[in-house]
Every structure is written in structure tokens, then in C-alpha cells.
Image (spheres, rainbow, N blue to C red):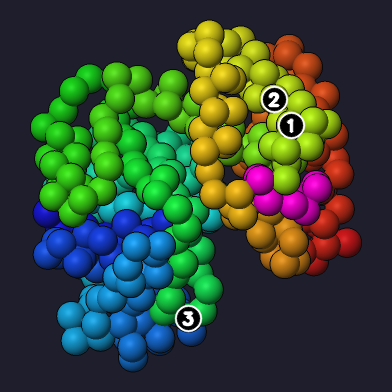
Amino acid sequence: MRIGIYGTGGAGGHFGARLAKAGEDVVFIARGEHLEAIRREGLVVETDAEEIRIPPATVKATDDPVEAGPVDVILLGVKTWQVEESARRLGPMLGPDTFVVPLQNGVDAARQLVGVLGPGRVVGGLCATFSWIVAPGRIRSLGQVHSIRFGELDRRPSARTEKLRETFERAGIRATVPPDIQVSLWEKLLFVVSFGGVGAVTRVPIGVIRAVPETRRMLRVAMEEIRSVSRARGVVLSEDAVDRGMAFLDGLDPTGTTSLQRDITEGRPSELEAWNGAVVRLGKEAGVPTPTHEFLYASLLPLERRARGLA
């Protein structure tokens, strides 16, 4: 498959580099100093086990979708607030059968893409990875949690998702096509948004959050609120979803943080609106109270506004 990585940040860079190393035809869409470093020195992903290096002689990187040309699948790795704008720029990369897999956290990206591209172009998706840009052209990936899930929005099996799963598997990437991608999206929302909000407010990594009884309880209550909102919106998570979410976080590297926490700590615009803000919004729409997420959202909003030049 010819694969376009639109947004070569932590997630897009990690999975794209592994696919390219395995011999897949990958083109990276990046920008600014990051793009220039990739062109000049190649793309490097530092992991606990190895350094993945795609040398400049073989890496394909551009900021122009026209130069990238048509691909079979696009992995969309931009920030949540950039999804619709990015979708409108994808035209030159779309062939007759090209489809887009969003990697954003949250539950809105697929709907936004469908609004621009139409339902036939979009497959629901999500990934698990602790990866971020540490320097232009260089990405750091922490731990062993890296995996990807995707599936048709109508829940039907398809040849294209199976072919993509096999492509990831050949590259040594854990890939799954779940029976219901909406359930998977909400399951991830449950733990990553709770972890992100609590981490951003407390400014400590997951090892500290889970070890302090008060913050551990806040984490669990935040997950329970999301489970209640999902149920009210017709997405039924398993009875042990919160327990499994806590168990997952208990198994993470104790130094782990989320992109939301890192962005807010460093004064950058974050995905607060699509994370805790979305839980508050969706809860209100469904008539479900979300006091923990309201607290997290309200506490972080002044920092978010300042990062965006609004305060």
C-alpha cells in the first residue's frame, strides 16, 4: 500500500517510520523546521528498544499534498482542531479508493472528516502511543504501548481494513479491527482524557497520580463520568471498562504523561476542547452531570486561552 502520513508528529511519525522501515511506500506531510530536518538528516524515532532511522536518501517528505500525490490510505495525525482544515487540503492525495484513518484522541474526528469528504472516504481509528517530537526530525517513543485500531463506521468487515491491518502487522505494529470502532473510541476516551485532565491539573506523571489516593480516586471518578455519558449516548461500554482502564494506567511507565499535559505545561495550544471540554459538552447534551470534568476543564481553560492568545 502507498501510505500518506498527514501530520508527522508523535503518533504519525512513530507509525509512519515503522511502516517505512518495513519497506512500505510512505510519504510524510510535515512542515517548518521539522520538515527541513527530515529532508536533511532523515526521520529518527527513539524507542526503548532501538533507534528507528529513515535516512534522507529514502525518506519522502513534503508540505505539499500535490507533491505527495495520490495514496491508498491517509493516516491523519494532526491536532484535533486541525482536522476539518486538513481534510479540505487532502484532495491531491485522494485516488478513486483512498480512505482516511484519523488518529486523534476524542470521538469527533471521524464525524468531522465525513462532513468534508463523505462517509465512503472515512474509517474510524485510534492509536495508543506515548510519542512526541523532541527535536526537529526526531521523535521519542516511550514504553511498549504502541498499537492502532480502526474499523468501518457502519461496523461491517471490509477488505480495505483487513488489508491495512495486514500491512501494519508486517511492520511489527499491533493492529486490530474491533467489532465496533465507536466502543473502542469511547474506551480510549475514558482513560486518556481522564489521565490527561488530571495530569495537566496536578502537573505530575502517571506514577504519582496513581500512587496518591486522592488523585487516584479523581482519576477513577473521571472515568466513571465518561462511562455514564457514553451509555446515555447509546455506546455501551463493558461493566469492567473503568477497572480495565485503571489497570492499563497502572501498567504504564511511571514517567508517562499525555500530549494534553505536555502542551499545557509548555504553554502551547492543547486539545482541551476535544478532551475534557468534549466530555462536558456531550454530557450536557445527554443530560448527564460531569462535575469532575467540569472542574478539570474550568481549571485548565485560562491556560488554554492564554496559549491561544485569547487572554
Identify which amino acid the numbered label 2 is placed on: Arg
Q: Is residue 204 magenta?
A: yes
Magenta-highlighted residues: 199-207
Q: Identify residue for label 3.
A: 136
Mark 1 Cα within 10 Å, few/some/many (few <14, many 20+)?
some
Q: Nearer the viewer, residue 46 or 86?
A: 46
Q: Is residue 61 left or right of residue 9?
A: left
Disc 2 vs disc 1: Cβ atoms closer than 8 Å? yes
Percent coordinates x, y for residue 294 in the rendering: 81, 31
Q: Quadrant of the N terminus?
A: bottom left
Q: Earlier in the sequence, mark 1 or mark 3?
A: 3
Residue identifier under label 1: 216
Check disc 3 and give the amino acid type: Pro
Residue 257's place in the image compared with 156, above or below, is below
Q: Give the SS element for disc 1.
A: helix
The reply to whether callout 1 and callout 3 are in contact (CB within 8 Å) is no
State the SS at label 3. loop
Circle 2 SS class: helix
Q: Is residue 9 above or below residue 277?
A: below
Residue type for callout 1: Arg
Q: Residue 17 shows which numbered tag?
A: none
Please indicate whether residue 304 sits to the left or right of residue 71 in the image: right
x, y percent for residue 269:
69, 60
Neighbourhood count class around disc 2 (C-alpha, 10 Å): few under 14, some 14–19, many 20 upward: some
Distance (Cα) linking label 1 and label 3:
35 Å
Mark 3 vs mark 2, CA separation in Å: 36 Å
